Image: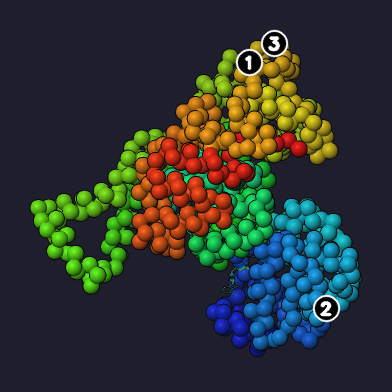
Amino acid sequence: MTFEEIGLKSEVLKSLKELGFEAPTPIQEQAIPYLLGEHSDFVGLAQTGTGKTAAFGLPLITKIDNHATVPQGLVICPTRELCLQIAKDLETYAKYLKINIVAVYGGTDIRRQMTEIKKGVAIVVATPGRLMDLIQRKAISLSSVEYVVLDEADEMLNMGFKEDIDSILESTPEHKNVWLFSATMPNEVARIAKTYMENPFEVSIGHKNQSNENIDHIYYMVKEKDRYAAVKRLIDFNPQIYGLIFCRTRQETGAVAEKLAKEGYSAEPLHGDLSQAMRDRVMDRFRSKDLQILVATDVAARGLDIDNITHVINYNLPDDIENYTHRSGRTARAGKKGESLVLINTRESGKIRAIEKQMRTTFTQGSIPNAEEICEIQLMKLINKVIKTDVREKEIQKFMPTVMAEFEDLSKEEVIKHFVSAEFNRFIEYYERAGDLNAQNSKDDRGSDDRSNRRERKSDGIESGKTRFFVSIGSRDGLNPGGLLRHICDATGLNSSNIGRIDIMPSFSFFEADDQYATEMVRQVNGTNYEGHDVSIEVTKVKSGGGSGHRGGGGARKDGGGFGGKFQGNRDGGQRREGGGQRSEGGGQRREGGFRSEGSGQRREGGFKKEGGFRSEGGFKKEGGFRSEGGFKKEGGSRSEGGFKKEGTGQRREGGFKKEGGSGSSDRSSSFGKPFKKKS
Ligand code: AMP
């Protein structure tokens, strides 16, 4: 089928031609003819990247009266980014129709949007919260709305817009058409379809909860402490990566991005703690490929609408399988191929099976590349770069006699070896000490005792170096392992790698966390509230305490309170001692937070970093600069938006890890590296 045969206006066909849209995508082929018909309630199960915006946008601009001055078309979507993107797409499609299209979204001046609406508008593209605000201020009339599009309905419900969506739909005329698009079909989406639609025509691109076939899903099994090192290897092994790394919490997102940036990768965080202006800047840089890697939370990445993302890396698995669908769907858009890489620990393989089952997809188990594999990739990249380098004959001419004289005694092979080694030795140095990061398979899911796990467990059944806590709520209170993990991380500012085994019982639960956090853990978590339930925890000792009584002594452990100056620094008015802590604790006690393992990691990388590194080239604008400057200046500068500038530049110029620790400590942004956040 062609666009001409579908029945679109000639003006629309003209803009499609200009856009280079030759033929409709599968969702367009099925949706457009139906939506152009008489009555048309519609459910489209499709991911972003399938062409769904045009699937509803083209019929919408064809059907509405383009002279309308009160909204006839209403598109509701979850995020500001998506809102702007949809409005822009509709304007492009309607270029020759002169339709007034207005985007209304939060985080920006409402009065300007009110003025635009007043001037007359035929199509409003809105986020739910802002639209509700406008309705309540009586700044918009929805009485003439004939078409309501709910885009990414599952995302909107995930984000808690259920009530807003209900109110908005109830504020529109009864005999409207509702066109609903969603990547997945949870019960709540089905409820909306049932409540507000009459016999909707349903089109599904792929299975309901199925992921795009162009995505390769690969999981890697690593030890908890190796997660970060494994991510770095995956990036090093894919030097052209244009990727998204997903983390579970804002803290983890910030910490991973900061560590990557400090080590010279072109990476920045995107999460809710950043101001809108900061998020816009990061997004602009990522969109323009000025930034190679975006480290994001699920919420912050919602509506992210960027083609050509090559890799999605799941630093941790999300708690909800649906979120995995959304995460992985950020790659392999518009018919391209992409990879979704997942790091799991030895107890999480059950989660992979669950995703496979629900998404009807298959994961392959990958192997974290070893030193030799990475060195080979990087060596080939270097050689390609050398071969492709423009030789500035004129400029170099006058130096050539001296240069040639210097090389006189070397054969061609020797010269090449020297040039290659000048760039390449740092890799070899870095990776020669790098061991295998692949962990052994475990049979069971989280909570099981595989052999390696057992080895690490003390006689009381608690993993060595960990304290076990009793939690006053359980599954009957709606608690699940992911929920508990999130709750602890949110309450304490720790990240998931500090937390070990989790056991959820019907009316109480247990979890393990690194020993040194024991006392503060109790202080920070006690008195918090989990979905309406008061949470209290106490230190327990399973098994050694005898019998089935899970509640142990409850007193302070001998190692409790081992936060050193770090935590104190935080609580005492947010003084940032983390950086100093990072250095002094480099070889020391901390299992996480980038302190012990990163400490040593940074040391190893110090030498490698100072030369400039291999990570940031290859088609990414800044990196072009980096090559000619022979340093990271540009990157460092660009990072200033994320608060990294001083550290980044300083550390790179100095090169050595010692300086790095020092400079990092004083300039560090307050949101990073805190083992615990201040309790409010
Ligand atoms: P969407 O799923 O709406 O986010 O669209 C994904 C990408 O596909 C966007 O960059 C669209 O511009 C592009 N696209 C949509 N429909 C077509 C088409 N029929 N032919 C070529 N590209 C398209």
The amino acid on which the numbered mark 1 sits, given as a three-letter code, is: Lys
Mark 2 to mark 3: distance in Å? 73 Å
For residue 266, side relative to residue 98 (left or right): left
The amino acid on which the numbered mark 3 sits, given as a three-letter code, is: Gly
Choose mark 1 or mark 3, whichever is in front: 1
Q: Which residue is mark 3?
A: 546
The amino acid on which the numbered mark 2 sits, given as a three-letter code, is: Lys
Q: Quadrant of the C terminus?
A: top right
Q: Which residue is mark 2?
A: 118
Numbered label attached to residue 324: none
Question: Which comes before the other along the chain, label 2 or label 3?
Answer: 2
Q: Which residue is mark 1?
A: 558
Q: How many marks?
A: 3
Seen at 57% across and 36% down, the residue is: 578
Seen at 73% across and 27% down, the residue is: 523
**Disc 2 CB within 8 Å of nearest ligand 1 atom:** no
What percent of the width, then of the height, locates residue 383? Answer: 29, 57
Q: Element type at marker 2?
A: helix
**Towards the viewer: 155 or 8:** 155
Q: Residues within 10 Å of mark 1 (few under 14, many from 20)?
A: few
What percent of the width, then of the height, locates residue 664? Answer: 51, 42
Mark 1 to mark 3: distance in Å? 20 Å
Choose mark 2 or mark 3, whichever is in front: 2
Name the residue furthest left.
Answer: 409
Question: Which comes before the other along the chain, label 1 or label 3?
Answer: 3
Q: Quadrant of residue 34?
A: bottom right
Question: Which comes before the other along the chain, label 1 or label 2?
Answer: 2
